[in-house]
Image (cartoon, rainbow, N blue to C red):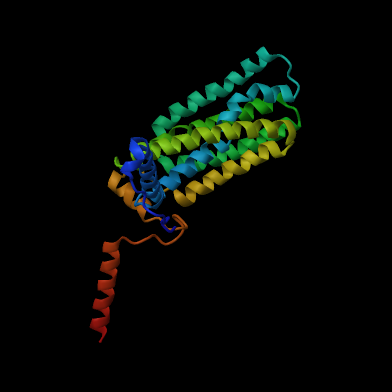
Amino acid sequence: GEEPSGAPLEDNAEDGPGRQEKVGILAKGRAWYKELFYGPEKNAVRTALGLAVFNQFSGSTAVTNYAVEVLREIGLEDNKKGILLSSGISFAKLIGIVASMFLVDGVSGRRPLLIGGGLGMSACMVLLTVGIEVKSIPLVITAESLYMLSFAVSWAGIFWVLMSEIFSMRVKAVAVSLATSVLFAGGAVANILYHVLLKKGGPLFGLFFALVSLSSAAYVYVFVPETKGKSLKEVQMMFQNLGPRGLLGPRALEPQEGQRLIGDGATKSSNSI
């Protein structure tokens, strides 16, 4: 995108220290905005924000928060029994996180786990929809537990792994803070949406989150390169070379590489004369 234009902020000593401090804060905010969204790490920032949105809008937090309420919706009136049955979801999350610790740097890597996790979550949300429609408590608990297992082995931990890998130290603090803010804001909105769709959405409830989870897998496939075993410089180069279509389109050339190709082309032309 084009870098936003605007008149430079000017300090006016006659307006007093309060005015100068306000102008200073605005100038820093504008500088960071340009750095994050139009600087050399813009692709990494946009990828991180996309991952934060999908992390929460797939329903990951809401599945745990509303597990008992889902059971009440299909006829279970005993809250204590509902809490006991829902404890399987937390156990599945624990198993998934432990498994992720061995897989993320082992046989798998970040990208396959995220894609597989998104596909698994999508399938489980479809299964959850079926369970709610037929009012089957065992099916609902199974679907929620498998969903949480899919999330925990992939998106739960790998999101934070990527946050530590894709930014330089120069922008890491601000970029990760921004992504974390989007993550928690997305979680709050997703929780509200989950509750509303559960009460009034019918089959749309689970199918919406199934579609979001499926979209998360597609997003990773297109925009998230594999960072396993790569140095920080290599990771930064991969993100800087991403084009508008991500990994599916032609990558952007670095100035040095462009000059080399131009030179090679000129040499071939002169040799053919």
Residue 132 vs residue 243: left or right? right
Which residue corresponds to the image point at 33% horizontal and 45% vertical from the top-left? 11
Which residue corresponds to the image point at 69% horizontal and 35% vertical from the top-left? 197
Whether residue 195 is visible here, answered yes or no, is yes
Q: Nearer the viewer, residue 200 or 118?
A: 200
Give the percent coordinates (x, y) of residue 128.
67, 33
Give the percent coordinates (x, y) of residue 217.
52, 45
Which residue corresponds to the image point at 51% horizontal and 48% vertical from the top-left? 219
Give the percent coordinates (x, y) of residue 82.
66, 17
Q: Nearer the viewer, residue 175 or 264?
A: 175
**Quadrant location of residue 90?**
top right
Residue 127 vs residue 169: left or right? right
Screen quadrant of the C terminus: bottom left
Whether residue 231 is visible here, answered yes or no, is no
Q: Nearer the viewer, residue 163 or 29?
A: 29
**Quadrant location of residue 130?**
top right
Residue 127 vs residue 118: left or right? right
Q: Is residue 48 above or below residue 180?
A: below
Q: Is residue 6 above or below residue 45?
A: below
**Quadrant location of residue 227?**
top left
Residue 7 vs residue 50: left or right? left
Extreme-top residue of the structure: 80
Give the percent coordinates (x, y) of residue 5.
41, 56
Extreme-front residue of the structure: 14
Screen quadrant of the N terminus: bottom left
